[in-house]
């Protein structure tokens, strides 16, 4: 700008001096005429360079850029610098993009870049193979049109991408994929998919093995148990010390039978992904049954109380929920010393429904709480065994609740007692006309 002003000054001073000289020599008209001529020449020069610029802008290549003169030399020089800067940063950007694409293409897992409308922007070759995409044809297509499995559609729509999902490809149902969406930037998403067929096969083998072994053990255990019961019941000919052995053997056989039953239940829960036969369950009547079973297990040693909101029902699998609720009540009884209170509550918590079992029992130290639903995890192994525990009860509860999209919450204080709550999502809650229900049994 500074330079421009100087240039203007250098051009205008001689022109003005010339006109001032002409004025006394040739008169005012000639002087003004010369001034006007100089202004026209100046303007024409600008039009010339403007025209050149307009022409060049139609095909803006660095090599053909005009050099310009006067102020236009500066304009073209500045433009040249700017375009060079832009070209170099564009080259850097595209080479970075190319490097990223090369790296992502070399990944063994599938990667798909989705824009804010879930349309495909780019994908690597493994994603093409695993999801049946064609980058050349499918760029710009919504991913939901091309990956059509209902599990994926619900996953995409749910907008909760914290967990991955398993998909069986439509072209080859024997192939299992693990798919996860990762949101990034401004509502864009990265879809990652991995072929987990070998791991799934191993998992199925493990499940089948446990199920088969448990199944095979069931019959011999029933036979041994039956004979032991007969021997124990025999009136004469057996010394009292031997009868004691039979009693112990029978106890262990029953324990093994429970273990086998629990293992079978777990493998059945694991092998079928969906909840069987969902019906509308009258939870209060189900809880009356659970309560009766609890009373029989407690055998009058505890005070059991049931508070159920009879207007709240649930959709789910009756047998599974019976087993889960029964396990929680059985634990409360087994881990509460004689004379303790056990309260069963069923009702609403906000929009969700919850079943709580509160006991005044031993309680659990905080460090154990997060691990209680692991298979065979016991806080006190000998107590669990002594009360007929298998170490699988809470694992079964957790599985059943997960199949019902419910969660297990555990609150406990050592020496004071525990509360185990099964919280069910609002979508499973069915509301009916309220009839207050309250049942008590005294110790
Ligand atoms: P188990 O057959 O040993 O009871 P579970 O899976 O049902 O196995 O429970 C795991 C462990 O959690 C138990 O061994 C016990 O230590 C603890 N536990 C479960 N319920 C209670 C409870 N109501 N009070 C105290 N401890 C409990």
Image (cartoon, rainbow, N blue to C red):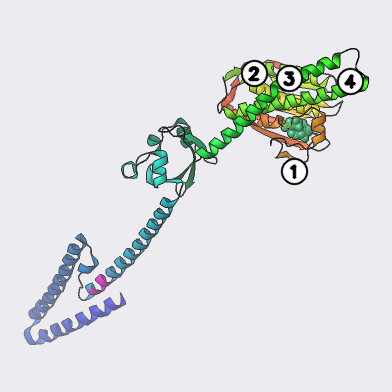
| Numbered disc 4: secondary structure | helix
Mark 2 vs mark 3: which is more N-terminal? 3
Q: Mark 4 Cα within 10 Å, few/some/many (few <14, many 20+)?
A: some
Marks 2/4: CA–CA distance: 53 Å
Q: Which residue is mark 3?
A: 222
| Numbered disc 3: secondary structure | helix
Marks 2/3: CA–CA distance: 43 Å
Query: Which numbered mark, 1 or 3, is in the foreground of this view?
Result: 3
Is any part of residue 10 visible from this angle?
yes
Horizontal side of residue 354 vs 175, given as left or right: right
The residue lying toward the viewer, choosing from 19 and 88, is 88
State whether residue 73 is above or below residue 336. below
Q: Which residue is mark 1?
A: 367
Horizontal side of residue 284 vs 340, given as left or right: left
> Magenta stretch containing residue 76, yes or no?
yes
| Numbered disc 2: secondary structure | loop
| Numbered disc 1: secondary structure | helix
Q: Which mark is residue 243?
A: 4
């Amino acid at each position: 700008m500074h330079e421009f002003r100087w240039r203007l000054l250098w051009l205008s001073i001689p022109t003005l001096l010339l006109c001032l000289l002409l004025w006394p020599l040739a008169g005012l008209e000639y002087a003004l005429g010369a001034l006007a001529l100089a202004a026209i020449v100046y303007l024409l020069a600008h039009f010339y360079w403007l025209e050149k610029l307009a022409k060049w802008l139609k095909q803006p290549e660095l090599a053909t850029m005009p050099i310009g003169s006067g102020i236009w030399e500066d304009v073209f020089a500045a433009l040249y610098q700017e375009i060079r800067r832009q070209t170099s940063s564009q080259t850097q950007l595209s080479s970075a993009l190319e490097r990223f694409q090369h790296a992502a293409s070399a990944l063994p897992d599938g990667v798909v870049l989705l824009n804010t409308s879930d349309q495909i922007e780019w994908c690597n070759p493994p994603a093409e193979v695993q999801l049946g995409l064609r980058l050349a044809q499918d760029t710009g297509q919504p991913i939901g049109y091309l990956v059509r499995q209902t599990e994926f559609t619900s996953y995409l729509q749910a907008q909760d991408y914290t967990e991955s999902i398993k998909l069986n490809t439509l072209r080859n149902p024997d192939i299992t994929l693990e798919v996860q969406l990762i949101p990034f930037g401004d509502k864009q998403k990265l879809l990652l998919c991995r072929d987990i067929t070998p791991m799934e096969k191993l998992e199925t083998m493990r499940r089948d093995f446990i199920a088969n072994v448990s199944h095979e053990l069931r019959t011999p255990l029933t036979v041994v148990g039956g004979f032991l019961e007969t021997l124990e019941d025999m009136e004469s000919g057996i010394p009292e010390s031997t009868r004691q052995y039979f009693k112990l053997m029978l106890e262990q056989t029953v324990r093994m039978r429970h273990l086998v039953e629990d293992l079978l239940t777990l493998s059945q829960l694991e092998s079928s992904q969906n909840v069987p036969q969902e019906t509308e369950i009258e939870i209060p009547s189900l809880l009356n049954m659970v309560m009766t079973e609890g009373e029989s297990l407690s055998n009058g040693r505890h005070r059991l109380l049931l508070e159920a909101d009879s207007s709240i029902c649930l959709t789910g699998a009756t047998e599974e929920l019976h087993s889960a609720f029964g396990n929680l009540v059985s634990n409360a009884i087994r881990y509460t010393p004689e004379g303790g209170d056990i309260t069963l509550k069923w009702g609403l918590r906000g929009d969700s429904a919850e079943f709580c079992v509160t006991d005044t029992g031993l309680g659990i130290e905080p460090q154990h709480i997060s691990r209680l639903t692991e298979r065979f995890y016991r806080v006190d192994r000998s107590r669990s065994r002594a009360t007929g525990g298998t170490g699988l009860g809470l694992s079964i509860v957790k599985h059943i609740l997960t199949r019902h999209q419910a969660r297990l919450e555990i609150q406990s204080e050592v020496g004071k007692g525990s509360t185990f709550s099964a919280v069910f999502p609002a979508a499973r809650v069915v509301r009916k006309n309220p009839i207050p229900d309250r049942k008590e049994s005294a110790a």
